[in-house]
Image (cartoon, rainbow, N blue to C red):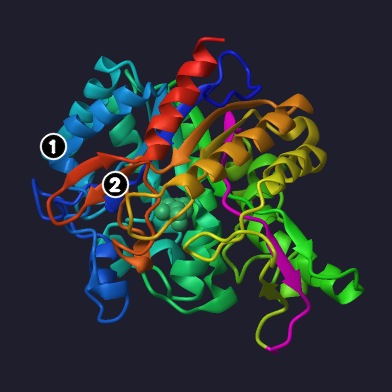
Amino acid sequence: MPDRYDLPANFRWGAATAAYQIEGAVEEDGRGPSVWDTFCARPGAVRDGHSGAVACDHYHRYAEDIELMRGLGLDGYRFSIAWPRVLPTGRGAVNPAGLAFYDRLVDALLEAGITPLPTLFHWDLPQALEDSGGWLDRDTAHRFADYTAVVTDRLGDRVPAWITLNEPFVHTVYGYALGIHAPGRTLMFESLPAAHHQLLAHGLAATVLHDRGLEVMLANNLTPVEPATGSPADAAAADAYDALHNRLFTDPVLLGRYPDLSALGVPDDLYGAIHSGDTELIHTPGLDALGINFYNPTRVAAPTQPDLPFDLVDIPDVPHTAFGWPVVPEALTRLLLTLRDRYGQALPPLTVTENGCSLTETTTPDQPRIDFLSAHLHALARAVAEGIDVRGYYTWSLLDNFEWAEGLLSQRFGLVHVDFATQKRTPKASYAWYRDVIAAHRGR
Ligand code: IFM
């Protein structure tokens, strides 16, 4: 008997990927270089010296991958559009061959009965824009709005809903604060103008999308934050981390104001980045749905070192993924209930835009992934039973893919195994399980 979950009859089932993680073909058909091409060439930046130069070769094999999606019975497919494929230098002349790829992809998805859900920015900034400051430069937000207009003029007749940004928290902190991801800057809190400029880009793009009658989403990586102990010092550290990880990227969009970051020693204007009228630009267009990328909760303790106002500590006594992330499905229920408490009427409908688990380089056994997904779907159903409006679930990921600084092999998130030497796709046990879950839900 396939697993059943108490989710709404019109609940949408999906899977997610991102351009640099699957497409490959980085030098084909006029694509310009992105920050990730540059970063991967830096010795030691990515495990085993891997890159997304070929990845899953999805650029050439998208038809085969859509057949895999059709086999799952997906309602929706979340993918990202590579800005440097469409505008090789991030601005100015459009690359017709790059746009044509997404045109073919969208048509093939629709032909398979799958609704495309594109993300406009999933971390692969055109290198030319990085060379003029990247997300530290306010102008990048305006170039993003122009890029949004180019893409939606071409695809907006067939694609109803759009995600502006993927996980601006991760891109800011890993890319600009800690240097673990491209573009590899190590600015610590002085990276926060990059957060503001991404949010501004979101707001400007949201206006472009709404002007065209399209729906706007934002995919935030959210984590319930728990203090390590009941001590006031741990509680204060947890609040500070919650403001940085969760509220910084959601409050301006839903409430039109930034959270208080003074406990982090960050000035109110984010080092001069926030100009008068910016929070209105971010907030006023509104959000039609909030995308939630959920992987794990975060336990926080008072700092033991002087350079950060918190320590992130492990959650012991629970399973951990290959990444070492704690598996705590009930934290998803808690997260969704907290969002309702925090934002009330300002909270739009929700969609889980990513959720999944990395295992090591084996096709089988795949049972830990099934257990992970199943437990999270039950946790989601519990939130729905409490009255939270969750419209869909996109598992991360359809395919094993290029997991950023971890390279190609160590963190396999796919329902489908990819042999990167041969490009052979092999559906895993979780693929059959997810297919049966979707079918059972429809048959109820
Ligand atoms: O692979 C990433 C994805 O690009 C963004 N969200 C988290 C995933 C797993 O690390």
Which segment is the magenta one? 286-306
Q: Residue at x 35, y 38 (%)?
A: 79
Answer above or below: position of 378 versus 82: above
Residue farthest left in this picture: 29
Residue 412 lies, with reference to residue 118, above or below; the image says below
Query: Within 8 Å: ligand 1 and the Cβ of disc 1?
Result: no
Find the distance from the CA under tag 1 to the CA under tag 2: 32 Å
Q: Nearer the viewer, residue 190 or 354?
A: 354
Compared across the picture, whether 137 is left or right of 33 comes to right
Is residue 290 one of those drawn in magenta?
A: yes
Question: Is 103 situated above or below 333?
Answer: above
Q: Of the residues shown, which amino acid type is indicated by label 1? A: Pro
Left of 239 or right of it: where is 438? left
Q: Residue at x 35, y 62 (%)?
A: 404
Packing grade of label 1 (10 A; few <14, some 14-19, many >=20) is: few
* Secondary element type, mark 1: helix
Question: Which of the labelled discs sits on residue 96, or is there none?
Answer: 1
Which quadrant holds residue 247? Answer: bottom right
Q: Residue 417: give its label.
A: 2
